[in-house]
Image (cartoon, grey):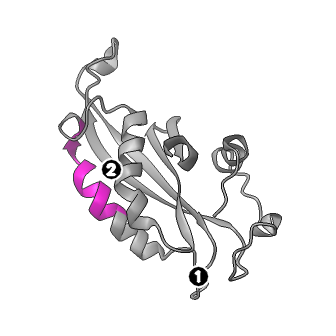
């Protein structure tokens, strides 16, 4: 799958302006499928403290985090970019089993939303890669109004 500038992706994903697949007719693969974004969301509860931060978040506290995993790719021979059930299984096994109801400082150093998003990316990248699709972005919300997005071009 081809990559586009962060600004274009940001507008589509963050503001919900998902373009129709036909808008990317020039990005077809051999199978003739249009480029699509496939997204699944999850939640998990966890506690952390930010040891290198000076403010109220340096004290132990918790969040109900929201996680969005987005793949980009083309339909396969079953006319799917990726099976939602399989994506749920992979995210549950690789991410949620380690983070849900965990003390995040035991899982990673300085568990900011930024570091959690990068950690999730590294856990999922190879597991969701297929000939027709790959990981596009990981978004983590600490609160309903505060989130971080990591895009493929940010970690390559």
Mark 2 crowd level (few <14, some 14–19, many ≥20, 10 Å Cα): some
* Residue wearing tag 1: 76
Q: Residue at x 38, y 36 (%)?
A: 115
Provide the secondary structure element on which disc 2 rests: strand
Q: Which mark is residue 12?
A: none
Q: Look at 55% across and 68% down and name the residue there.
A: 133
Q: Is residue 98 magenta?
A: yes
Q: Is residue 130 above or below residue 100?
A: below
- Vertical placement of residue 27 versus 44, above or below: below
Q: Nearer the viewer, mark 2 or mark 1?
A: 1
Which residue is situated farthest in the bottom direction here?
A: 77
Residue 74 picture quarter:
bottom right
Residue 30 location (% of width, % of height): 69, 80
Q: Is residue 120 above or below residue 134?
A: above
Q: Position of residue 97 (x, y in %)?
A: 24, 57
Percent from the top left, x then y, of residue 152?
A: 54, 49
Q: Nearer the viewer, residue 152 or 104?
A: 152
Do we see residue 139 in this rendering?
Answer: yes
Residue furthest to the top: 54
Ranked by sequence position, the earlier of labels 2 and 1 is 2
11 left or right, relative to 73: right
Q: For the magenta stretch, what is the residue range?
A: 91-104
Name the residue beneath numbered marker 2: 44
**Label 1 packing within 10 angstroms: few (<14), some (14-19), many (20+):** some
Give residue 32's position: percent from left, percent from top. Answer: 73, 81
Q: Quadrant of the N terminus?
A: bottom right
Which of the 4 image quarters holds residue 25?
A: bottom right
Q: Mark 2 and mark 1: span between their CA atoms?
A: 30 Å
Q: Residue at 70% of width from left, 78% of height from top? A: 33
**Main secondary-structure element of the magenta-colored stretch:** helix
Is residue 145 depicted above or below 9 in this figure? above
């Amino acid at each position: 799958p081809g990559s586009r500038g962060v600004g274009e992706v940001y507008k589509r994903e963050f503001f919900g302006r998902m373009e129709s697949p036909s808008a990317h007719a020039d990005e077809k693969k051999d199978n003739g499928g249009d480029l699509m974004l496939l997204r699944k969301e999850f939640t998990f509860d966890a506690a952390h403290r930010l040891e290198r931060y000076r403010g109220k978040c340096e004290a132990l506290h918790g969040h109900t985090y929201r996680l969005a995993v987005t793949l980009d790719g083309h339909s396969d021979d079953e006319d799917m970019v990726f099976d939602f059930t399989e994506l749920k299984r992979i995210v549950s096994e690789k991410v949620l089993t380690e983070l849900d109801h965990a003390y995040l400082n035991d899982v990673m150093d300085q568990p900011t939303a930024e570091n959690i998003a990068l950690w999730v990316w590294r856990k999922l990248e190879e597991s969701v890669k297929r000939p027709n699709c790959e990981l596009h972005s990981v978004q983590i919300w600490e609160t309903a109004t505060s989130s971080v997005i990591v895009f493929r071009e940010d970690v390559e």
